[in-house]
Amino acid sequence: MEEVTRKNKRTTLERADKFISPIYFKDVNLRGRLYNQHHPLKALTHHAARGRIPYDQAVRGKFTKTKIGQSFGPTWSTHWFQLEIEIPDAMKDKEVHLLWNSNSEALVWHSGNPIQGLSADYDRISFPLSTVLGKNETRCSLYVEMACNAILGEGKDSMIGPPNMDKSFTLSQAEIAVFDREVYDLIIDIETLHDMAKHMSEETERGYQALYTVNQMINTLDLDNRETYAKAHQLAERFFQQKNGDSQHVVYAMGHAHMDSAWLWPYAETIRKCARSWSCTVRLMEKYPDFTFTCSQAQQYEWVKDNYPGLYAKIKDLVREGRFIPVGGTWVEMDGNVPSGESFVRQFLYGQRFFMKEFGKKCTEFWLPDTFGYSPQLPQIMRIFGIKRFLTQKLSWSLVNKFPHHTFWWEGIDGSRVLSHFPPGDSYHMTGKVEEVLRTVKNYGDKGRSGRSVYLFGYGDGGNGPSEEMLMRMSRLKDVDGLPKVQQKTPTEYFADVEREDSGNLCRWRGELYLELHNGTYTTHAKVKKMNRLCEFLLHDVEFMSSVALVQCVSRNASYKYPTDELHRLWKLLLLNQFHDVLPGTSIGMVYEDAHQYYEDIVSTCKRLFLEAIGENKKSDSVTLAFNCLGWQRKEVVTINNPSGNPAKKQRKSLDEKMVQHDREGNTLAMLSVPSYGYSVLKPLKCEKPCSIERNSDGTFVLCNEFLSAKIDNMGRIVALFLDGEERNAMSSESGCYGNQFVLYNDVPLYWDAWDVMDYHLETRKPVVVSIKEAVIEERGPLRVSLGVKLRVSDQSLIQQVISLEAGCPYLRFHTEVDWHENRKFLKVEFPTSVHSMSATYEVQFGHHQRTNHNNTSWDWAQFEVFGHKWAAISEHNFGVAILNDSKYGYSTRDGVMRLSLLRSPKSPDKEADMGAHSFTYAVMPFQGTFQSAGVIQAAYELNSPLGVHTGGLDKSSPESNSFFSADNPQVILETIKKSEDSDKALVLRLYESFGGHTKVTLKVNFDFKDVKRCNGLEEVLEGDTSNDLEVKGNLITLSFKPFQVVSLLLDF
Ligand SMILES: [Zn+2]
């Protein structure tokens, strides 16, 4: 009898590992047998393309002979190759592959269509020729489009380093060979058994069963005797056929290719990445009928539609079959913090409408695997687009606290709930390996509540997606005793199963999903944030004014065409730039060249469209008018530009000189009253309560108006801030405390340079205390007083500031210009308030959200830097202080000190990020009562949307001042007025409750309309809806609101 051999676990494991190793012992192991009978190409020629040119143009290029070993470059260039292939007789009837490795990304073309992507990074270097060859065909001609970049860009010193722009790429392999599928199967068997033996718990014997099986397979295999192959495979099959019990966790596997619309590569490269990735997916689907693939971002579908119509047609067929699954419903996977409420709405509006038009269906789940925090308003936005399900996973990156759930109800600030799932494998590029499915179950935070989870497989970030290897691995894991059941499913199947089986067991998370990492992204690339805010307001203004022009022209039978196509184009540019690596400021410099070009396009086109709307609107005599694009009456100091541009020449002689003030540029300041969403002729009002400025004997200045008085020192810092007639100083009176104190921090993160500001930066606070030019009075009233000051931040960087107070304005404004040339420094401005409170409030999309003002728990102190929009406030009973801004998103409030984050200076992935000139405005507003009753919300809108003065026309019949829309309750903000997407005789009005309470509002519409109904985000009428008690009387529309509710109305005229 043969004695049983004792086994050492480590050597047995490593034996199996080396038997399939692509590196070691390949001359004698199984992997070495995967490809054989290598044969050269018949001919190989090359054409260096000028840029990313289309196929038709490329094939007309001049191709010259080239060979293996040749190098091509530089980075981001494109090279086309023509390949002549002839299969020799010895390879006939075998599975022949093209093996192509240009150490870059590449795409195989045949007969004018992209056939399959290739990428050296993920070892996707083989292309089965049967894809393009008929049964008895032995010759073909292919093109390969080589993109001179790796899948994750070309970071010089690290992945996220600025790109090496001058790299060359060597063609190291270009040949055909026979692929041995039997060997391939055995490799997957051995790998899976090895991984089970390695990663399964020692507490069960299943891992050892795998170990002994794989060992026996290797003993059975004689690589020179093919008969042993089948015997070895049978050993594996017998093992994989041993099934689980019914209670085993089920992994819902879905193919995915997380595709950043731009990141370490420009937008133009993403278009090609889509073709490379999705063509691979289509090829796999032809072979594997149960393979499902989830794919988000309407923009990427549109790119493929426009650039690769043949591929797109195939995708459309697969979408119809329910295997290529559009998910998400948004235009791009956007940043989850910075876009405005209306931007969020448009992401879904244009995304869902695209999916409906192209594929006849809406997405049923929001899909945002990779963003840097999640606004507490997102659940409501999803719900108004009919989406009740949400998938993400980024929260697993939190640095301090582990988020407790993977399957749960997420509840937004208005109480809207969505069923949410985080794939617990903590990755959106799984590869079908045993270790990953074990991790999926081990990590799962809701064990016992829901026995299922999602598993997204496929290479991601730069695309690429699932490979055949992954599908082969998962085919072994369908139901193997000891492992979770891994089944190819769809998102709908997953969520429907949870809803049906588990929904009553799930916990609830209310409010923000805060990511405890990447919180520098509220500030990085300040100009991108500024342009995003500006464009959001400009598009708003154009839509309002164009809507008015449309209504008036319809009523007068005049001709005015609402600029639908242009507005769609502009919105889509803005939405694209909100992608989760562009708006956060975490892309390479090339991306921002494109992004700023798009912003310039939006700005200039919006300015033209606005003028066209008011020109059409008010014909005949040219009259200068002031326009108010906000939903309440405003009495404000307006700047009327000097058209001559000559500072000496005062203009607007027609205005009463006693009523106006002139600034240094010769512009005229006048106090005007303009009604809600309307206009008025320039009729300056008498300033009843002028503002004033004085210099004290101690060198400080006092700026006063009817609302407040501020004492400011010669460096522009607030020594004291009082509400009119009150003795209470809004700033802390502790010595050394100043409002408007600039502070500089060292800002060196652990790795993610543009992304992260770490907790320890707070320990490096350095006040900016060197002035180059002490404060001087620049304007003395009566409408505006101002002080100018110039400070030195460092040897390289300067701040120039104008501190101003206007008559009738409740806040002190700081117009700030910074010349910024720092390296890993973070500039903030601080306001140490005297307010006693446990929390501070920050504006978010269509509402606001509270966060703590202390560091009690790890959840509190991990939020040392948070996002907010146009304002943040800290309040105690009957008193508070708010900070307003025109382009900033990073805040921190601790122990009553409010800080607004201004500029960062990371060097990766864009070494020029934030270098150079910046200009922005913020303001401080002390208030009595609550921030709601004091008008903080309205003031922040006003700071961002000054009354505009334009020369239009006015009919004799037109009134001198007119309001097109108004509301009788400041609690409800009429945010958006636009033409309906589906009708030229309907407008959509979007309103939201901004205070956080129940209320009723009456909206006055200053023209005749036929009907008004509630609609959803997609502008579909909600038939029979009575939830808002909508009533119409003449031109008045009354409706009720719940806290933070967003309501859209469809107004037929
Ligand atoms: Zn991403």
Image (cartoon, grey):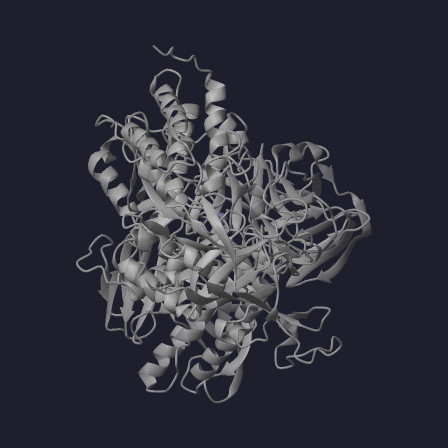
Nearer to us in this view, 995 or 730: 995
Is residue 975 at all visible to an observer of this figure? yes
- Quadrant containing the C terminus is bottom left
Quarter-of-image position of residue 226? top left
Asked whether residue 1044 is in view, the answer is: no
In the picture, measured across the screen, residue 161 lies left or right of residue 701, that is: left
Q: In which quarter of the image is the N terminus?
A: top left
Which residue is situated farthest in the left direction here?
A: 1024
Question: Foreground residue, 599 or 559?
Answer: 599
- Count of picture labels: 0
**In the depicted structure, whether residue 1011 falls above or below residue 244:** below
* Location of residue 911 in the rendering, given as x and y in whole percent from the top left corner: 69, 52
Query: Relative to residue 797, is residue 634 drawn left or right?
Result: left
Residue 67's quadrant in the figure?
bottom right
Q: Quadrant of residue 557?
A: bottom left
Compare residues 633 and 143 and report the one nearer the observer: 143
Picture coordinates of residue 146, whole percent (x, y): 55, 61
Say above or below: 725 vs 558: above
Measured from the top left, where is residue 23 in percent x and y?
55, 37
Q: State the image coordinates of residue 319 (x, y, percent, origin top left).
A: 29, 58
Which residue occupies 31% across, 63% down?
316
* Residue 667 or residue 576, whichever sits in front: 576
1009 over 788 or under it: above or below: below
On screen, 1010 above or below 256? Answer: below
